[in-house]
Image (spheres, helix red, strand yellow):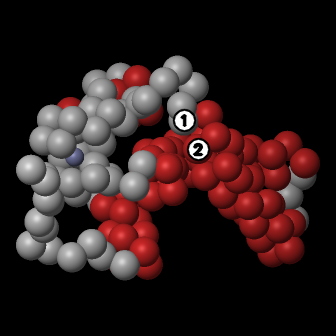
Amino acid sequence: MTNSVTTTQPEPSSLKKAWLYFSRSARLKCPVCGESPLYKPVSKVRSVNDWFQTLSGCPKCNYVYDQEPGYFMLAIWTLDYGPACIFGIAVLAFLTNFFNLSTVQLLIFTLIPTLVFAVLIVRHAKAFYLAMDHYFFHK
Ligand SMILES: [Zn+2]
């Protein structure tokens, strides 16, 4: 007796699958099912931890978001700090070219927006990392 699996929907192509995971991550949804959120809604964030930490997993498809301690370290370094550094350099270049500011003013007007930018994009950095991990290693 053979156990054949029949699927009604064909497997999407690799590029379509990549776009699907990317779009789910952009909406901060589970990369597998695309329906459950990755984080608490912004209206229910009560602490810094609520903002930074993903939910434990997807209640619909049981995909575990935070798969091990330190799982999102690469996401933080590459997809959060990297863009934040580029943003900070762009802000600094803009300020030095168009305004005559002291060094302290340049530091304040560069570091504060850069820190805010890094905090704002951290959820998407983790979401994109989770989608890339699922795309490349959990097919
Ligand atoms: Zn899911």
Residue 110 circle label: none
Circles 1 and 2, Cβ within 8 Å, touching? The answer is yes
Find residue 72 and name its label: 1
Q: In the image, what residue type sits under mark 2?
A: Ala
Quadrant of the image occupied by residue 58 = top left
Q: Amino acid at mark 1?
A: Phe
Nearest the viewer among 42 and 132 is 132
Query: Mark 2 = which residue?
Result: 75
Which residue is depicted at the point 32% across and 54% down? Answer: 31
Give the structural element (helix, strand or loop) at label 2.
helix
Residue farthest right in this picture = 103
Picture coordinates of residue 14, whole percent (x, y):
42, 74
Residues 73 and 139: in front is: 139
Residue 139 in view here: yes
Q: Is residue 53 above or below residue 75?
A: above
Q: Residue at x 9, y 72 (%)?
A: 8
Query: Residues under labels 1 and 2: Cα distance?
Result: 5 Å
Residue at x 64%, y 40% (from the top left corner): 74
Q: Where on the picture, by quarter, is residue 56?
A: top left
Compared across the picture, whether 108 is left or right of 35 comes to: right
Q: Horizontal and vertical percent for residue 9?
A: 14, 74
Task: Locate the C terminus and report the quarter of the image it occupies.
Answer: bottom left
Q: Position of residue 64 (x, y in %)?
A: 32, 33
